[in-house]
Image (cartoon, helix red, strand yellow):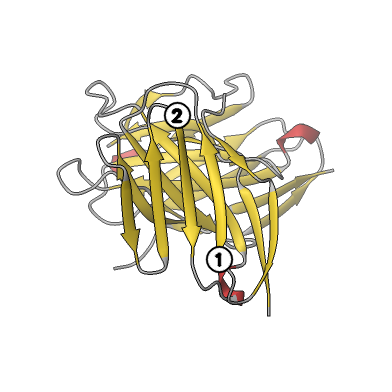
Amino acid sequence: EAGVAQSPRYKIIEKRQSVAFWCNPISGHATLYWYQQILGQGPKLLIQFQNNGVVDDSQLPKDRFSAERLKGVDSTLKIQPAKLEDSAVYLCASSPPRTVQETQYFGPGTRLLVL
Amino acid sequence: SQQGEEDPQALSIQEGENATMNCSYKTSINNLQWYRQNSGRGLVHLILIRSNEREKHSGRLRVTLDTSKKSSSLLITASRAADTASYFCATDLGWDSGAGSYQLTFGKGTKLSVIP
C-alpha cells in the first residue's frame, strides 16, 4: 500500500512569511496527526484529526498555525507569519482503525528553515 | 511535554556488536512503542509492547518493559551499518474514546551509529 505522502520535502522562507504543508494519509486511515520535530528532539504533536474534525489541538500555536482536513482525507498545515523558532521538520502521520493496530505511519516530513 | 527519556543520547558501536537503548517514562502507560528514524526521513514503527507484557522479540530486536521502574529497553543484536538511525520510544495512555484514537508521546531519542 502507498505510504503517507507529504510535500514539499524542503522549504526555506524568511521570517514573517507564510508557508503551507500538504499531507495525504494512507487510504482508509481516519486519524491524521501533524507533529513538529525540532532538531535533536522527538516529535511533538501539534494537532490531531479524526476524519475531518479536530480532536486535539492543545499544543498548536493558534496565533500563527492553522490546519484543516477537508473531506476527511488530505490535510494542510499553515504557518503565518513564520518565526525563526518554527525551523523544524513537520511530520504527518496517520493511523488505522482501533481494531487493527495502535501504531502510527509517518510520512517523510517537510524540513522548514526560517531565516 | 515529553513523557519518555532515552538513554544514552548517542551510541557508537562496531558492526556485529549489540546495541542497547533505554527509555524511562513518568506516568503509567498502556503501550510502549519503539520507532526508528533514518536521517532526513520519517519515523518507522519497530515494535509495540503492552503494559502487561515483560518482553517481546521481533527479528534482531528485543524489547523489555518494567512497569514498576517505568522503563523499557531496546536491544538490537548483531548490528549492521543499516541500523544507523535515531531510535525513539513512544508511550500511550490507552484508547481515547473522545479522540477516537491513541495518542503518542515521544522521547528525545537515541542516536545510534554503527561503524562498518
Q: Is residue B106 left or right of residue B28?
A: right
Residue at the image position 58 percent from the left and 76 percent from the top: B16
- Is A101 located above or below residue A67 in the figure? below
Q: Amino acid at mark 1?
A: Asn
Q: Amino acid at mark 2?
A: Lys
On the rendered image, what quadrant is the N terminus of chain B found in?
A: top right
Percent position of residue B96, x then y: 27, 25
Nearest the viewer among A114 and B99 is B99
Q: Does residue B60 appear in the picture of this structure?
A: yes
Residue hosting label 1: B18
Percent position of residue A12, x then y: 76, 51
On the rendered image, what quadrant is the C terminus of chain B found in?
A: bottom right
Percent position of residue B47, x then y: 36, 54
Residue hosting label 2: B70
- Pick out the residue farthest to the right: A115
Could you tell me how far apart the alpha carbons at marks 2 and 1 are, in whole angstroms?
23 Å
- Is B48 located above or below residue B37 in the figure? above
10 Å crowding of disc 1: few (<14), some (14-19), many (20+): some
Location of residue A43 by image quarter: top right
Which element is circle 1 on?
loop
Q: Earlier in the sequence, mark 2 or mark 1?
A: 1
